[in-house]
Amino acid sequence: MRRVVILSGDTISLGLLMKEDIPKLWEWFNDRDVRRFLVNPEAIFYLEDEFEWYEELRRSKDKNVVFEILNAATSELMGVIGLHRINYRDGNAELGYFLGKTYWRKGYTSEAVGLMLEYAFEQLNLRKVYARVYEPNVGSQKVL
């Protein structure tokens, strides 16, 4: 599958979110281990909800930017990363991300966050990017 890459790093790339990838993201998003540190960890999502989320995201490009995290060598989907609630007037946005479990603890998220910050500051001209992390989520604390 051909992918549009926005930014590339050493081991990962950030690419445009593709509708065909929604079923895989839906599977990961419903994984209790992945959801544990996300907002509303108890939530269950139906595939139709994720397709609706994708369409809403496409229509609100000015408020949210979400990229796929891809293996730079193989273009394999690894997760997603995004800037949410983008406020151009005040120059800020909230960062959020998740990876499929098989990609945890390998440095991919740190590289993805670095690329996303580069995009936020150099392409979107933001001045502040913030993230929320739950206290037991030591992995994200290290990344941030």
Image (cartoon, helix red, strand yellow):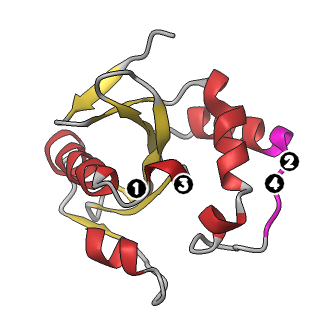
Residue 27 location (% of width, % of height): 72, 45
Left or right of 76 in this view: 53: right
- Compared to residue 14, the image places residue 94 above or below, namely below
Label 4: how many Cα within 10 Å (few below 14, some 14–19, many 20+): few
For residue 47: magenta? yes
Give the magenta range.
Answer: 43-49
Q: Which mark is residue 86?
A: 1
Secondary element at image label 1: strand
Q: Amino acid at mark 1?
A: Ile
Mark pair 4, 1: CA separation: 24 Å
Most extreme residue toward the bottom is: 135
Residue 134 location (% of width, % of height): 49, 84
Front disc: 2 or 1: 2
- Out of 84 and 96, give the one closest to the viewer: 96
Q: Amino acid at mark 3?
A: Lys
Residue 72 location (% of width, % of height): 29, 28
